[in-house]
Amino acid sequence: MTDLTERFATEAPGGHPNRVPKDAATLILLDRTGPTPKVLMGRRHHGHVFLPGKFVFPGGSVDPRDRQMTVGTPLDPRPEKKLMHQVRRPSVLKARALVLAAIRETFEETGLLLGSRRPQPPAAPSGPWSAFAEANIHPDLGGIHFIARAITPPRRSRRYDTRFFTADVSGIAHRIDGAVGPDAELVELVWIPLTEAKSLPLLAITETVLKDLQAQIDAGFSHDLPVPFYRMLHGKRTRELL
């Protein structure tokens, strides 16, 4: 489990080989039951060397076992198609694994299991996914929204190709206590109005994605909406639409 905030921190280039970005995913939980949409953020431990006490979204790298996890409902074909655009060896399995990675990382960092409870457990690989099987929770991908994609600029010490997803709070089917606390990576979880979250000290990519999320909500929050893709091309930062 790794922290996505570090992946987009400002870092002067130079001295590092131009590594191939690793696939990664993050999930923004969204509560739209009130007049103002809220997002779930976690505050990092003050003992962390990097960004101590800052609020972040859960996320991390794709694990090979994410491809082995069964799901309750499939991913909508529209975000599925966007996830396979401009990707090496695109496949439905890879697109699904990206979404599952975001769900798994959310569980690992918050204790929240997203999906639906069924009489029988899902077929799950060993590791963190076993908690879903023990609770009879089947991950549901149908309600997941693809919000943005960003690749860390070249010649950084670490490079990631991260997809940003959102899921509605109603998708939380179970919670396991103990993931958040004084000795954990995240010491607390807070629901923050989207407008206020953008005023917090944030990394540039986090602020940008929150603006993209607000724009999608304002436009109707449809899977048909284009997804921005941020990366460096020929030494310039670019924003394409998938």
Image: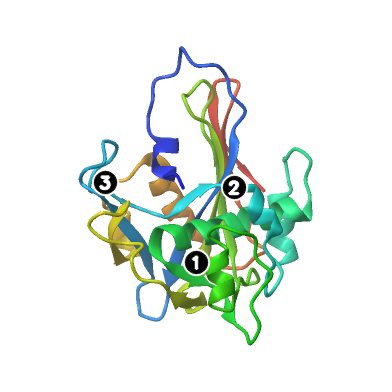
Answer yes or no: is residue 138 visible.
yes
Looking at the image, is 14 positioned above or below residue 4? Answer: above
User: Label 1 sits on what residue type?
Assistant: Ile
Q: Earlier in the sequence, mark 3 or mark 2?
A: 2
Mark 3 neighbour class, 10 Å CA radius: few under 14, some 14 to 19, many 20 or more: few
- Helix, strand or loop under label 2: loop
- Nearer to me, 118 or 115: 118
User: Position of 202 compared to 30: left or right?
Assistant: left
Q: Position of residue 171 (x, y in %)?
A: 52, 76
Q: Which mark is residue 217?
A: 1
User: Label 2 sits on what residue type?
Assistant: Val
Task: Give the Cα separation between the discs numbered 3 and 2.
Answer: 27 Å
- Residue placed under numbered mark 3 in the picture: 201
Task: Give the Cα separation between the discs numbered 3 and 1.
Answer: 23 Å
In contact (CB < 8 Å): disc 3 and disc 1: no
Count how many numbered circles sit on residues in the image.
3
- Nearer to me, 157 or 38: 157
- Which marked residue is nearer to the observer: mark 3 or mark 2? 2
Residue located at (53% from left, 31% from top)? 159
- Residue placed under numbered mark 2 in the picture: 62
